[in-house]
Amino acid sequence: MGRLALSLGILGILTLCCLGIAVGLRSLAAEPNEIRVTLDPARVTVSPGETFTVALTIENVSLDAVRITAIGLEEALGDVLRVEATEPAFRGTRARSYPLLGAWDEYALDQRVLAGEKLPVTLTLTALRAGNASGEVTVWVRDRLLGVSFERARRATLDIAVR
């Protein structure tokens, strides 16, 4: 009986530790409160081959400066459009995929935005083929917790119809 109680106690402690880790990871994955993000327009109807722009406004609503590390376009958007350019210009691209967060193409910016300021970003896009897509445009912010650097993302949805 004593071994069973010990085993159950150890199992309970391991379960609590796993739950604590999961809650901690979820808070790190939460959207940052330091910025507000808007897309204009957030719904677009274009023809195949047409190049168009979308204005992304990143507003720092915190009391401290923030570092915008990158902008990402969810994989679903990449099926119907291609990024031609951004203003300010992106410094490189990479594909990312995480089981719980999804997959996207990321465009490195590395821009500092002071408290209360806005960073306007113009996305120049080309519609590739006919179809509808809806996906997230993510803005990655560098943050620190207990001296450890990590990134969190604020999201805005872009709906596109290519006809």
Image (spheres, rainbow, N blue to C red):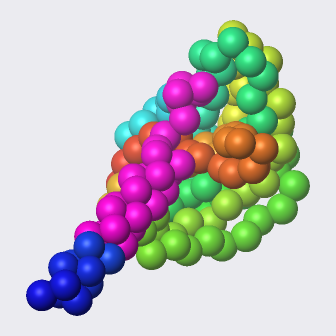
Residue sticking out furthest to the front = 2
Left or right of 123, for residue 129: left
For image coordinates 53% across by 28% down, the residue present is 33
Res 96 → quadrant = bottom right
Principal secondary structure, stretch drawn in magenta = helix
- Is residue 34 shown in magenta? yes
Q: Nearer the viewer, residue 28 or 146?
A: 146
Residue closer to the observer: 147 or 161: 147
Counting from the top left corner in percent of width and height, residue 74 is at 50, 61
- Judge whether 145 appears above or below 133 on screen: above
What's drawn in magenta, residue-wise? 12-37
Q: Quadrant of the N terminus?
A: bottom left
Quadrant position of the C terminus in the picture: bottom left
Residue depicted at 67% across the width and 61% down the height: 106
Residue 145 percent location from the top left of the image: 68, 42
Q: How many marks?
A: 0
Q: Determine the image quadrant of residue 42.
A: top left
Describe residue 160's horizontal placement relative to residue 64 as left or right: left
Q: Which residue is painted at 40% across and 56% down in the image?
A: 20
Look at the image and tell me whether residue 162 can be seen.
no
In percent of width and height, residue 44 lies at: 42, 43
Please indicate whether residue 70 sits to the left or right of residue 49 in the image.
right
Q: Quadrant of residue 34?
A: top right
Q: Residue at x 49, y 40 (%)?
A: 31
Q: Position of residue 19 (x, y in %)?
A: 34, 61
